[in-house]
Image: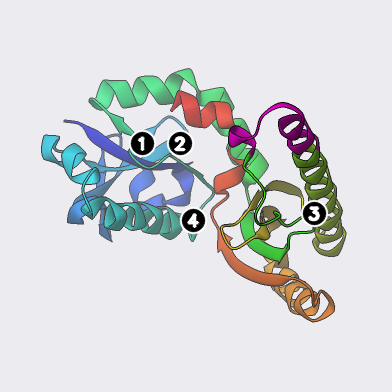
Amino acid sequence: MSWYAYCITERNAFPDLARHRRPMPMAGLNGLFGNQTFFFPAADLAVIVSEHLPEDAARIQTPEGQAAARDHARVISNCFNHSTVLPFRFGTTFEDDEALRRSVRSNQRHFMANVERLRGKAEMHLKVVVDDICPETKGVTPCHQAAGQEYLSQLRESATRQRERQSKARALSLQMHRMFLPLAEEITCKRTDSGKMLLDIAHLVDKKTVERYQNKYSTATIELKDCAMQLSGPWPPYHFVHRDQRSQA
């Protein structure tokens, strides 16, 4: 039987299921396409899975895939309410029981280290939008259409704009770090189609400090009047599971 994998969790966090050695159904929790989820024990860990039928792989690639992605996140969030979780990437499958056990066994030490590192932690997600300090000039010939001296000049101007944007983004992200004091952070910055700068910030925090973090956010929205901010969370620590773990899984 093939398995669809949602996340790795601590076996002892589910005492009613932890004593079993075989996959056990999880009551009241369905996964992708309404499939029953199972608690799959593997040493001190467990993998939350559901049956994966051949037709399910094709359905993920259809418009149903968006609903499936939400179901994937829902199952992980449900488990996150009970235990530390290491989320799998959407679409992760294993051919059979042995393939799943082999994957966990070969990465056991790494998985356990991540569980210890992320125990009691949650992810808060900030989106910060500000005006671009270097808006594109209208009416200028695009670089790929320019030639000669004009081309070189536009390259220099583009590089200057990019450096100034990066400097602005670093200053703003540092300001956010000082304000929220996260345990760890992941930040990306891009220019939106509307000509704004968007900072996408993931902060790792202790679960017990979430309310304090939310209070700081309320203060920040008042103090930073030139920023449009949006907060979501707490979430499972999607951005803080080691990247090599995600790729191996």
Q: What secondary structure characterizes most of the magenta part?
A: helix
The quadrant in which the N terminus is found is top left
Specify the label residue 80 is tagged with.
4
Q: Nearer the viewer, residue 246 or 198?
A: 198
Mark whose residue sits in front, 3 or 1:
3
The residues tagged by marks 2 and 4 sit, at their Cα atoms, a distance apart of 14 Å
Q: Which residues are magenta?
A: 143-156
Judge whether residue 97 is colored magenta.
Answer: no
Q: Looking at the picture, how far across and down is residue 142, in whole percent?
A: 62, 42
In the picture of the structure, the residue carrying the numbered disc 2 is: 45
The residue nearer to you, when weighing 186 against 118, is: 186
Label 3 – label 1 distance at C-alpha: 41 Å
Amino acid at the residue labelled 4: Phe
Residue 134 pos. (x, y %): 78, 55
Q: Quadrant of the C terminus?
A: top left
The Cα–Cα distance between marks 4 and 3, rounded to whole angstroms, is 28 Å
Label 3 or label 2, whichever comes before in sequence order = 2
Q: Are marks 2 and 1 in contact (CB under 8 Å)?
A: yes
Res 41 label: 1
Q: Is residue 38 above or below residue 156?
A: below
| Relative vertical location of residue 192 with respect to residue 11 in this rendering, above or below | below
Residue closer to the observer: 155 or 131: 155
Foreground tag (3 vs 2): 3
Give the residue displayed 59% in from the left and 33% down from the top. Answer: 144
Type of amino acid under label 3: Ser
Q: Is residue 176 above or below residue 4?
A: below
Q: Mark 3 sits on what residue? A: 173
Residue at x 87%, y 59% (from the top left corner): 178
Spatial CA distance of label 3 from label 2 is 36 Å
SS class, disc 1: strand
The picture places residue 28, in percent across and down from the top left corner, at 26, 63
